[in-house]
Image (cartoon, rainbow, N blue to C red):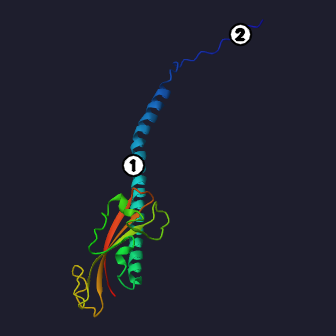
Amino acid sequence: MAARAAPPRSNAPRQRGAVLIVSLLMLLVLTLLGMPALQAARLDEQMTGNARDRLLALQAAEAALREAEAELESLTDLGAFATVAGFYAPDDVPPAPYAADTWTDAKSRAASALGGTASTPRYYIQLLGTDTAGGRLNLQGYGKTSMGGGVHASFLITARGTGGSDIAQVVLRSHYGRVF
């Protein structure tokens, strides 16, 4: 049998895995430094989503206001004003704008649906008063000049819109005047 040759001996000291430990420690430090950056990016994304929802809710509420104004312009008289759901006479107590049950079919009117919103925008209209004596009805300083004959009526429109979720809600109010 042939004799086996012994492997050559190296004069270098034996390696003990120090490079592995150092590289793992460096990786741990880099991970700890990277975590706050990831959390900040996540927070920025959430804030952007919330801002988008808020703007979408604002657009929905504004669209409901415009639709309510168009409905007031289509009225020919105020005779049946308080008999319609979502319309309130001067003596009526309108619902609270921030109560959840205000925005149901019995107390408010649905506006045209807006894409991307969680709920259909809604509104209600309160008749604040009328004046038949040549336009003395003043809407908090607006319309200081007389608009001539007819019945001058002022209204308070309250509209609510939601964003991509029902959490984001915007309630807007607008005074509107019209001559009949």
- x and y percentages locating residue 86 in the rendered image: 37, 70
Q: Nearer the viewer, residue 42 or 50?
A: 50
- x and y percentages locating residue 140 in the rendered image: 22, 79
Q: Quadrant of the N terminus?
A: top right
Tally the marks. Answer: 2
Q: Nearer the viewer, residue 69 or 38?
A: 69
Residue 7, above or below 140: above
Tag nearer the camera, 2 or 1: 1
Check disc 1 and report the residue beneath it: 40
Q: Nearer the viewer, residue 4 or 174?
A: 174
Check disc 2 and report the residue beneath it: 4
SS at mark 2 in the image: loop
**Residue visible at 37% across and 61% down in the picture:** 169
Amino acid bearing label 2: Arg
First in sequence: mark 2 or mark 1? 2
Say few, some or many: other residues with alpha carbon within 10 Å of mark 1 (under 14 / 14 to 19 / 20 or more). few
SS at mark 1 in the image: helix
- x and y percentages locating residue 176 in the rendered image: 31, 79
